[in-house]
C-alpha cells in the first residue's frame, strides 16, 4: 500500500469496482495520482462486504492509519459504501474517507444513469428496435420496475426501520410479486402486511410508527426518489424476468442477471450529479493530503 497513493475498498464484486473505479479514474488521473481498488472480500474477517469495510475503517481510524506516510510517500485509504437505509437508522459514518451512494446501493445508480435498452441488446444480442420498444429510453424502465415492487418496498422498509425480523426483508426478492416483472398479488400483499403488522404490535410498535414507515416510502416515490428506498440489486432480477418472458429470441438464462447489470453499467456516462460529487470528494481528499505534490516528485 505504501507504493500506491490512494487505496480504495468497495463492497461488492459485480459492478462496484467498475463504477467506483470510473469515478476514481476521473478524479485522480488529472492529478497524476495512482490508485488501487479492492473488494471487501480481500479484507480478512467475517461478515458481508459492508461489515468488513466498517470494521477495517474503525481499525484504521482508531490507529490513526487512514492516512499514512512511509519514507515521505503518503497513502490515503478510502471506502465506498452502499447507503442502504443507514441514513434512516443513524448509521452513516461521517468521514471524508467514507463515500456513500446517494441511493440504496450502487446498482441504483447503474440503472438510474445507464441505458437499459442498449444494455439488453448488447447482453442478449437483440435488435435495438425491439429493445427500445420494450424498455423505452434512458431512465424510463427503472421507474416502471420500482413501481411494480412498491408493495414489497413498503414491507421491507417498515421491517428494516422498525427492526422487525421476518420474511419481509431487503435480503430477498419480492415475495409478493410471484412473477418479478408483473404486478404484485393482492392476497400475498395482504397476508405479508397482516403478519408484519402483527409482529410489529407484539414488539410494541405503535400503529402510528407503522403508518409513518410506509408513508416515508410513499413520499419518496411521489417525489421520484424511489431509489433511496428501493434496493438496486433487485433491478436485474426484474429485468432478467422480463427479458426471458418477452424476448423474440431464445435467451440463455444462466448468469443473465449478472450479465445485464454489467452491461447497463457499461452505458453509464459518469456525469450525473452523484458521479460528479463523488469525483469532487475523491479529488478533494487527494489534494488535502498533498498527493498532487507527492506524485510530481
Image (cartoon, helix red, strand yellow):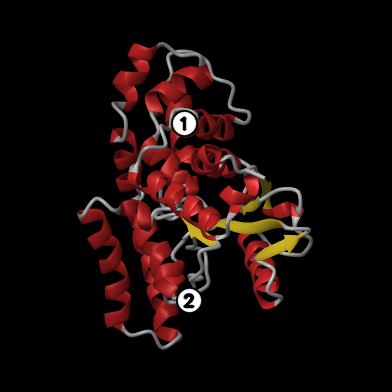
Which residue is outermost to the left? 222
Q: Quadrant of residue 67?
A: bottom right
Rendering coords of residue 146 (x, y %): 34, 46
The residue under label 2 is 163
**Residue at figure coordinates x 36%, y 51% from the top left:** 227
Q: Nearer the viewer, residue 124 or 267?
A: 267
Q: Nearer the viewer, residue 88 or 193?
A: 88
Front: mark 2 or 1: 1
Side (left or right) of 45 relative to 291: right
Rendering coords of residue 164 (x, y %): 48, 75
Q: Quadrant of residue 88?
A: bottom left
Rendering coords of residue 79 (x, y %): 59, 58
Is 283 above or below relative to 135?
below
The residue under label 1 is 264
Side (left or right) of 160 relative to 217: right
**Residue at figure coordinates x 29%, y 26% from the top left:** 136
Amino acid at each position: 500500500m505504501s507504493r500506491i497513493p490512494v487505496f480504495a475498498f468497495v463492497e461488492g464484486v459485480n459492478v462496484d469496482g467498475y463504477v467506483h473505479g470510473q469515478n476514481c479514474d476521473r478524479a485522480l488521473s488529472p492529478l497524476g495520482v495512482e490508485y488501487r481498488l479492492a473488494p471487501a472480500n480481500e479484507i480478512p474477517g467475517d461478515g458481508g462486504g459492508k461489515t468488513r469495510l466498517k470494521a477495517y475503517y474503525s481499525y484504521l481510524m482508531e490507529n490513526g492509519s487512514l492516512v499514512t506516510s512511509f519514507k515521505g510517500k503518503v497513502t490515503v485509504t478510502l471506502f465506498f459504501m452502499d447507503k442502504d437505509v443507514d441514513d434512516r437508522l443513524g448509521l452513516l459514518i461521517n468521514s471524508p474517507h467514507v463515500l456513500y451512494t446517494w441511493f440504496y446501493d450502487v446498482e441504483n445508480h447503474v440503472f438510474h444513469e445507464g441505458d437499459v435498452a442498449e444494455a439488453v441488446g448488447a447482453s442478449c444480442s437483440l435488435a435495438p428496435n425491439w429493445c427500445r420498444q420494450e424498455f423505452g429510453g434512458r431512465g424510463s424502465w427503472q421507474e416502471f420496475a420500482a413501481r411494480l415492487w412498491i408493495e414489497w418496498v413498503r414491507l421491507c422498509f417498515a421491517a428494516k426501520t422498525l427492526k422487525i425480523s421476518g420474511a419481509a426483508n431487503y435480503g430477498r426478492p419480492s415475495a409478493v410479486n410471484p412473477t418479478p416483472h408483473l404486478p404484485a398479488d393482492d392476497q400475498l400483499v395482504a397476508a405479508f402486511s397482516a403478519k408484519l403488522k402483527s409482529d410489529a404490535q407484539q414488539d410494541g410498535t405503535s400503529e402510528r410508527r407503522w403508518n409513518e414507515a410506509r408513508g416515508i416510502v410513499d413520499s419518496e416515490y411521489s417525489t421520484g426518489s424511489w431509489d433511496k428506498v428501493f434496493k438496486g440489486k433487485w433491478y436485474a432480477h426484474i429485468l432478467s424476468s422480463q427479458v426471458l418472458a418477452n424476448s423474440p429470441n431464445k435467451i440463455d438464462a444462466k448468469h443473465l442477471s449478472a450479465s445485464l447489470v454489467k452491461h447497463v453499467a457499461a452505458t453509464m456516462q459518469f456525469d450525473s450529479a452523484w458521479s460528479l460529487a463523488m469525483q469532487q470528494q475523491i479529488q478533494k481528499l487527494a489534494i488535502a493530503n498533498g498527493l498532487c505534490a507527492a506524485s510530481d516528485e
